[in-house]
Amino acid sequence: MSGLLGDTAARDYSRKLRLFNAFAEPELRQAIASLDVAPGASVLDAGCGTGEVLRWFADAVGPDGTVIGIDLASAHATAARACAPAQALVLQADLLHAPLRAASFDRVWCMNTINHLHDPVAGTQLLASLLQPAGRIALCQSSLLPDMYFAWDARLERLVNEAVRQYYRDRYGISERDLAAVRSLVGVLRRAQLGNVRAHTFAIERVFPLGAADEAYLAEAIFRDSWGARLQPYLSSDDYDELARLCDPQHPQFALHRTDFHFLQTFTVVSGER
């Protein structure tokens, strides 16, 4: 059965995952540091994508620790194996039926994944069962707050963000309420009977001039793959034309080359203890 957002073993968005991890690496490393992962610890990355986070956890646990990644998509698992350090094990499997022993991890990290499940609470309970006593699970979401801040046009910002949401609702046949897991991570952990729930939101903030990783992610993953022609049916012709100019590297108003460019997105980590 596919996930809520159409995920299957054959699905592949490796390029977008690599771009995001390179873009948000400073904030992701801060988030990992906030989990107090001790040397020698065992860590599971549930929904490991292309595997960059496995390297950072390997740095935290050191040579005596254990790092395992699991992802449903075959292409993602293949990419993760190529990226991960030698000590990390990568599994291609459904995390709801993972070949893993109960009570075997000190930390479970689950980034941009729990909202893909039809039942996030049941999924969280299953992942929490893999924790040792007093272990912590961290549910992480990079779109807890509105996706992007336009310093130059709040009206267009609102329209574009709503157009993106409507596109996904139409594409996957879901309602706004079906996507509530994105914003209810605290509630998900509490309903899953986790204790000592903590939340920490990190700001991903970039201004002109941008570094290469920042520009690549914003231009490719956002301007081209998340926006682009797919939003045309959801915007007026004038608003779509304005957005197209902002996204066009050849146009004088290309957003990423404007001296007033100011991007703000958030990344939230909510953790709970078994």
Image (cartoon, helix red, strand yellow):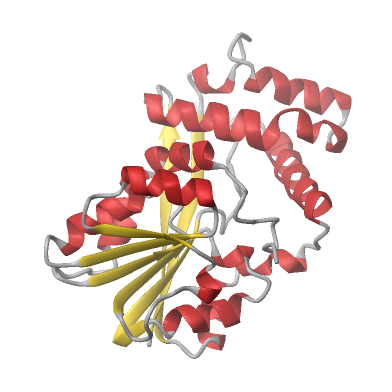
Say whether residue 123 is visible. Answer: yes
Which residue is painted at 53% across and 86% down in the image?
A: 192
Which residue is painted at 47% across and 73% down in the image?
A: 98
Looking at the image, residue 175 sits to the left or right of residue 132; the answer is right
Q: Nearer the viewer, residue 189 or 16?
A: 16
Looking at the image, residue 160 sits to the left or right of residue 207; the answer is right
> Could you say which quadrant of the image residue 2 lies in?
bottom right
> Could you say which quadrant of the image residue 230 lies in?
top right
Looking at the image, residue 6 sits to the left or right of residue 145; the answer is right
Give the image location of residue 140, x and y in percent. 46, 63
Give the image location of residue 237, x and y in percent. 87, 25
Count of all numbered marks drawn on residues in the image: 0
Q: Nearer the viewer, residue 249 or 152?
A: 249
Looking at the image, residue 233 sits to the left or right of residue 69; the answer is right
Which residue is painted at 71% across and 28% down in the image?
A: 228
Give the image location of residue 131, x and y in percent. 35, 82
Give the image location of residue 260, x and y in percent. 51, 24
Say whether residue 182 is visible. Answer: no
Q: Is residue 230 above or below residue 98?
A: above
Which residue is painted at 56% across and 77% down in the image?
A: 123
Q: Nearer the viewer, residue 117 or 153?
A: 117
Q: Nearer the viewer, residue 160 or 177?
A: 177
Quadrant, the N terminus: bottom right
Q: Is residue 10 above or below residue 150?
A: below
Quadrant, the C terminus: bottom left
